[in-house]
Image (tube, coloured by chain):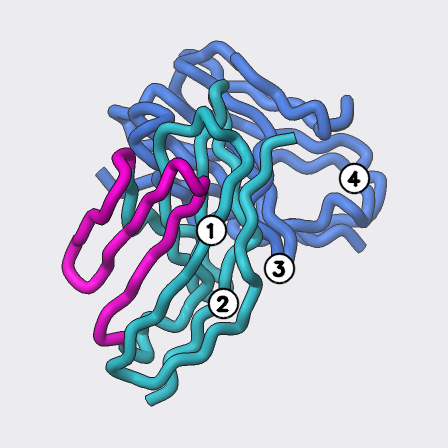
Amino acid sequence: DTGVSQDPRHKITKRGQNVTFRCDPISEHNRLYWYRQTLGQGPEFLTYFQNEAQLEKSRLLSDRFSAERPKGSFSTLEIQRTEQGDSAMYLCASSLGTDRGYTFGSGTRLTVV
Amino acid sequence: QKEVEQNSGPLSVPEGAIASLNCTYSDRGSQSFFWYRQYSGKSPELIMFIYSNGDKEDGRFTAQLNKASQYVSLLIRDSQPSDSATYLCAVPTGGFKTIFGAGTRLFVKA
């Protein structure tokens, strides 16, 4: 197993465009998380999947953000009508349980210009 | 609002010294506590976790937990320049998410 994979590693987009990121978790992990991290801050929770079910979503997440995990395997995070404030590192993590810690992917760095 | 607080640093220690990183948390019901290391431009990596009051040692790392004081710390013995990174304290909530502190930047001088 090669760990958690994220694609793309970097994305530069113009304001107003839609972007989609992909995450492939560790195959044995049924829990998948999306976090966002800006410079000088810790990761901020966005959403959580257990298998294919999205069980928790941050109240900070606007309607422009949507995430899916079809068939409980890979996950996608889509941001519609991007804004400059969306510029951040988007981190995907997978886990066997909340008390087991996370394995993070390498992240997708989004720059909105 | 559940919070995890860390001194942002930078904490600068000479090579071979003990680095002490501290974290406080607001949710008295928290049961597990994690430390992640994050090198510049990289993603966080889990290095330690602790569930019970007291100390837990793993190699050069020791995690210390005091639930009564809502305080968790990470000691790094024989600090090396390769330990220079940001250390994130993380505390799972009663739900499904984990709250991360903003991290403490550690710089180990050769």
The range drawn in magenta is B51-79
What is the letter of the blue chain?
A
Cα distance between the residues tagged 2 and 4: 31 Å
Percent coordinates x, y for residue B17 in the rendering:
28, 79
Mark 1 crowdedness (10 Å alpha carbons): few <14, some 14-19, many ≥20: many
Quarter of the picture containing the N terminus of chain A is top left
Residue assigned mark 2 = B105
Queried whether the magenta region covers residue A68, the answer comes back as: no
| Marked residue nearer the N-terminal end (2 or 1) | 1
Q: Which mark is residue A82?
A: 4
- Quarter of the image for residue A94 reads top left
Mark 1 residue element: strand
Subunit under mark 4: A
Q: Nearer the viewer, residue A42 or A32?
A: A42
Q: Colour of chain B?
A: cyan
Is there a contact, CB below 8 Å, between mark 4 and mark 3? no
Note whether B9 is above or below B91 in the view shown.
below
Cα distance between the residues tagged 1 and 4: 34 Å
Mark 3 residue element: loop
